[in-house]
Every structure is written in structure tokens, then in C-alpha cells.
């Protein structure tokens, strides 16, 4: 699973970074056509909004792979080690269920429904842009399952930053 995780993270970084780069270029193009050429490009603005959604969802999958999603470290730090482990697994399980129900199932439903609708400027089925929802849902499920397995095996630190209770050191700025 570690090789899969590394490969998926590498691909997600490239896709999210590529989306961001394309957004910058398209936004500059939009400004150029609107103010310099006085003939605004309608398709670029629409594409930027879809690329932003793709970038955000791929970024969320990257965060899931690193266990960087929301948590309450002040609460977890005060728990005994056994509870901390159980809480970490529960946290991953909640993320797994969310990814399965909302992103994978709901995303597949909305993608299927939107395949019959076309974008106004690009003339592409809207469902093509929604396919990122079930894709990232499936990736998140794989990442959270791998995280749960790594927690059970003791390969992932249970506190943020990899520090266990009593290991706190003041960070120098």
C-alpha cells in the first residue's frame, strides 16, 4: 500500500499543481482579453471555476493521505494511549464513511445526472467536471483505510507532528 500511496500522492501533486498553473494562465488570459483586447473570453472564466474545484478536491485527497484533516489535538493529547489509538481509528472511519457516502456515492449520482447537461461556454458535459467527486472519494477511502491499518500497526504517530505525550519541545522561530 505504501507504493500505491506514494504513486497516488505524486500524481495528485502533479494534477493539483497543473490545475493551479492552468488557472493562473487562464486568469491572465481573461484579464488580457477583457482589458487589453476589449473582447472578454467567456470560456476561460468557466474553465477556471471548474479547475478550482478539481484542485480543491485533489488537495483534500492529499491532506487525507497525510492525516492532515481536522482534529482536536488538545483533546487527543489528554487521552491515554489506548483511547488515543481508538480515537484516531474512529476519526479515520468517519472520514472513510463521509468519502464513501458523500463523495463516492453522491458524486457518482450527480456525475451521472449531469452528463446530459452541457456547460454554457465550453460545450462539454458538466458530468465530465463532476467526475472528480467519486474519483477523490475512492482515493480518500483508500487513504483512510491505509491510515487505519498503519495506526493499528503502530506505524503512524497518534499526535499531530509525530510527538507523543511528554515529547513536546518548544519550536524555535
Image: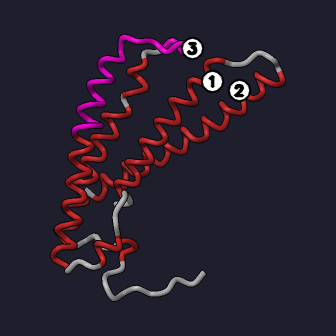
Residue 107: say if magenta. Answer: yes
Asked if the residue under mark 1 is in contact with the one under mark 2, i.e. CB atoms within 8 Å, the reply is yes
Q: Is residue 99 above or below residue 92?
A: above
User: Which of the labelled discs sits on residue 121, or is there none?
Assistant: 3
Q: Is residue 11 above or below residue 46?
A: below
Residue 113: say if magenta. Answer: yes
* Residue 157 appearing in the image: no
In percent of width and height, residue 93 lies at 20, 54
Q: Quadrant of the C terminus?
A: bottom right
Q: Residues within 10 Å of mark 1 (few under 14, many from 20)?
A: some
Cα separation, mark 3 vs mark 1, equals 9 Å
Cα separation, mark 2 vs mark 1, equals 6 Å
The numbered mark, 2 or 3, whose residue comes first in the sequence reads 2
Residue at image location 78% in from the left, 27% down from the top: 32
The numbered mark, 3 or 1, whose residue comes first in the sequence reads 1
User: Which of the labelled discs sits on residue 95, or is there none?
Assistant: none
Q: Is residue 83 above or below residue 11?
A: below
**Residue position for label 1:** 44
In percent of width and height, residue 61 lies at 37, 48
Residue at image location 33% in from the left, 36% down from the top: 135
**Residue position for label 2:** 30
Per the rendered image, the range of residues in magenta is: 101-123
Q: Nearer the viewer, residue 139 or 168?
A: 168
Amino acid at each position: 500500500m505504501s507504493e500505491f500511496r506514494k504513486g497516488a500522492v505524486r500524481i495528485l501533486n502533479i494534477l493539483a499543481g497543473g490545475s493551479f498553473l492552468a488557472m493562473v494562465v487562464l486568469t491572465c488570459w481573461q484579464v488580457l482579453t477583457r482589458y487589453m483586447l476589449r473582447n472578454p473570453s467567456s470560456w476561460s472564466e468557466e474553465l477556471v471555476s471548474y479547475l478550482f474545484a478539481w484542485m480543491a478536491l485533489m488537495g483534500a485527497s492529499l491532506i487525507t493521505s497525510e492525516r492532515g484533516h481536522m482534529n482536536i489535538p488538545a483533546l487527543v493529547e489528554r487521552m491515554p494511549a489506548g483511547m488515543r489509538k481508538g480515537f484516531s481509528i474512529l476519526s479515520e472511519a468517519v472520514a472513510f464513511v463521509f468519502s464513501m457516502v458523500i463523495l463516492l456515492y453522491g458524486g457518482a449520482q450527480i456525475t451521472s445526472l449531469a452528463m446530459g447537461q452541457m456547460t454554457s461556454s465550453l460545450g462539454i458535459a458538466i458530468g465530465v467536471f463532476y467526475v472528480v467527486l467519486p474519483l477523490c472519494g475512492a482515493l480518500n477511502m483508500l487513504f483512510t483505510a491505509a491510515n487505519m491499518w498503519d495506526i493499528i500497526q503502530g506505524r503512524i504517530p497518534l499526535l499531530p507532528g509525530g510527538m507523543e505525550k511528554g515529547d513536546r519541545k518548544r519550536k524555535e522561530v
